[in-house]
Amino acid sequence: LLNDISEKRHRVQKELEYHDACLAPIQTLPVDLLREIFMLVPTNALDPLSSPWIFGRVCAFWRLLCLSTPILWSL
């Protein structure tokens, strides 16, 4: 019984991961690749409409990523 429950939990967890990835496939990209993409976008760290500011408004993860990537703010 415990084995069955464990297997079912694992299947449900995999389904949730699949559906999450379908809803936001960009979340499956490695952090380093996202940083590279962010750095390819022209930026002006003083302009509030510039890419690091805009990227930081997408979600909490992107905000943390932008804030932890100093080069975005110095370009």
Image: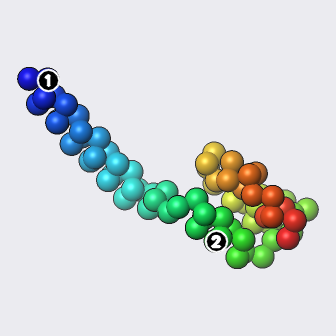
Look at mark 2 in the image and give the residue it sits on.
37
Mark seen at residue 11? none
Q: Residue furthest right?
A: 46
| Residue found 58% across the figure and 67% down from its top | 33
> Which residue is painted at 39% across and 56% down in the image?
21
What kind of element bears circle 1? helix
- Upstream in sequence: badge 1 or badge 2: 1
Q: Nearer the viewer, residue 57 or 74?
A: 74
Q: Position of residue 74 (x, y in %)?
A: 87, 65
Instruction: Locate residue 68 relative to residue 45 in the image: left or right.
Output: left
Mark 2 surroundings within 10 Å by alpha-carbon count, few (fewer than 14), some (14 through 19), many (20 or more): few
Residue at 81% x, 71% y: name it. Answer: 43
Which residue is drawn at the image coordinates 21% and 42% (left, top)? 11
Alpha carbons under labels 1 and 2: distance apart: 45 Å
Q: x and y percent of residue 57 in the render?
A: 69, 52
The quarter of the picture where the C terminus appears is: bottom right
**Which quadrant of the figure contains the N terminus?**
top left
Q: Does 24 appear above or below 42?
A: above
- Numbered-mark total: 2
Residue 2 in percent (x, y) is at 14, 23
Secondary structure under tag 2 reads helix
Numbered disc in front, either 1 or 2: 1
Q: Residue furthest left?
A: 1
Which amino acid, by three-letter code, is at mark 1? Leu
> Is the residue 73 above or below the residue 11 in the image?
below
Which residue lies under the disc numbered 1?
A: 2
